[in-house]
Amino acid sequence: MHIVLVSVHVRPEGLETFRAASIENARSSLQEAGVARFDVLQQQDDPTRFLLLEVYRTPEDSNRHHETAHYAKWRDAVSDLMAEPRSSRKYWNLFPEDGG
């Protein structure tokens, strides 16, 4: 599996719009064959901070995700809502095994 964690800091006035757009994007992303999981998480002690947990079957599936219409719609909808540029880190799965 290819795992991407995206950290996003949203301006307070953009919270509801960001949340709705991100959930819509996650729902659409789960329809992609190469997406195993797509979670939208909001930090409890600072609701302006979000984490997107994206699990792809291969790195190529991550690249294909960025070519979808729903990703472009999300990117354009949230770009002006961020308090700072989003950041991402990539991980390999160690446990449980990918088949589990």
Image (spheres, rainbow, N blue to C red):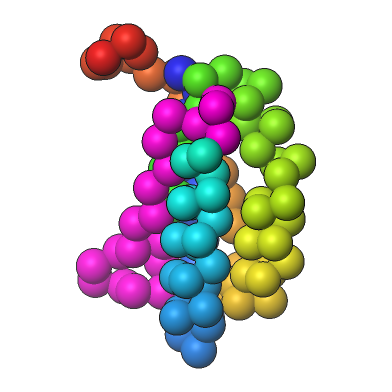
Q: Residue at x 38, y 47 (%)?
A: 39
Q: Residue at x 76, y 41 (%)?
A: 67
- Residue 23: quadrant of the picture: bottom left
Decide which of 84, 39 is in the foreground and name it. 39
Residue 1 point in image, percent of width and height: 46, 18
Decide which of 71, 27 is in the foreground and name it. 27
Residue 61 point in image, percent of width and height: 62, 26
User: Is residue 27 among what the camera can see?
Assistant: yes
- Residue 21: quadrant of the picture: bottom right
Numbered-mark total: 0
Residue 28: in magenta span: no
What is the residue that sits farthest to the front in this orientation?
31
Q: Is residue 64 above or below residue 25?
A: above
Q: Residue at x 54, y 55 (%)?
A: 25
Residue 10 point in image, percent of width and height: 51, 73
Which portion, as a residue range, is magenta? Answer: 32-50
Residue 48: in magenta span: yes
User: Is residue 89 among what the camera can see?
Assistant: no
Question: In the drawing, does residue 7 fall left or right of residue 73?
Answer: left
Quarter in which the C terminus is drawn: top left
- Residue 83: quadrant of the picture: bottom right
Q: Is residue 75 above or below residue 60?
A: below
